[in-house]
Image (tube, helix red, strand yellow):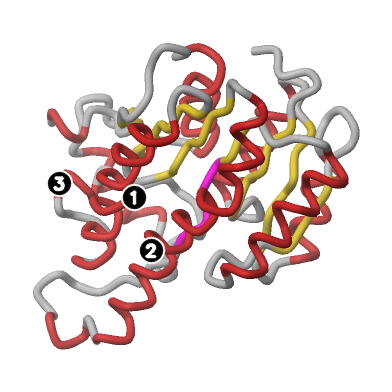
Amino acid sequence: MDLKNKVAVVTGASGGIGSAVSQRLAEAGARVIVGYNSKAAEAEKIAASLPGSGHKAMQIQVLDSPSLKELAATVERDFGRCDVLVNSAGFTRMIPHHDLDALTDELIDSIFAANVRGPFAMVRAFAPLMKKSGDAVIVNISSVAAISGSGSNIAYGGSKAAMDTMSISLARVLGPEIRVMTVSPAAVDTAFVPGRTTAMVERVAASTPLKRIVTADEVAQAVMAAVTHLTSSTGWVIPVDGGKLVG
């Protein structure tokens, strides 16, 4: 998995999955932009802890499209290239599926903005720079909720289904210079979902054929496979779910 001289941008890199992806990319030799929204201290700590050199924590506000164009220009100026983009930033809240009234219009809009519009805006901003690489990869972090209709709330699953479909469309129009892949984990024991406990994640894992919790590093390994090994694949979803979709 040699990514020497490559540059990777990871959104949501101060979170569990994003930080694990950043670690794996750095171990493979890439210089990593550790993207964060508000957790600057955490991102700086992660960037400083990565193996290798040249890593940098940078604020990435995925809902501010003009700032993303400026970000892409900054990355080109300071790093010269962008070979890998991992869209790991997202948003959700725990809302019981039967409680339709609790899923307000404002919350639905926030979820779809963060999980669909934000990743698309990142791709739109970075595509011109990534095409210059000639062999670039975008990996969008989705969820098996997109297929199962489960997850933290109904809108969250819908937003990830939109991401899956959007990734197919992007793969079609961005090739051959850029491949687009999606990694789709089941519940991972991170702080991503406010109010979700380890016990909740364990119950989900117990219902799968492998009967164990998916780790953030296992998601990161799937991202690395998409980047470095599945070189003839684009537009596909890689499930990292312990077999949940067949359980």
Q: Disc 2 vs disc 1: Cβ atoms closer than 8 Å?
A: yes
Q: Which residues are magenta?
A: 86-90
Where 99 falls versus 128 (above or below)? Answer: below
**Residue hosting label 2:** 196
**Residue hosting label 1:** 201
User: Rounded to the nearest whole Å, what is the CA distance between mark 2 and mark 1?
Assistant: 8 Å
- The question of residue 181 being in magenta is answered with no
Q: Main secondary structure of the magenta part?
A: loop
Answer with the quarter of the image where residue 86 lies.
Answer: top right
User: Rounded to the nearest whole Å, what is the CA distance between mark 2 and mark 3?
Assistant: 18 Å
Name which of mark 1 and mark 3 comes first in the sequence.
3
Q: Which mark is residue 46?
A: none
Depth check: give the residue in front, 19 or 63: 63
Q: Residue at x 28, y 77 (%)?
A: 108
Q: Which mark is residue 148?
A: 3
Give the class, few, some or many, for how many residues have Cα within 10 Å of label 2's Cα (few <14, many ≥20).
Answer: some
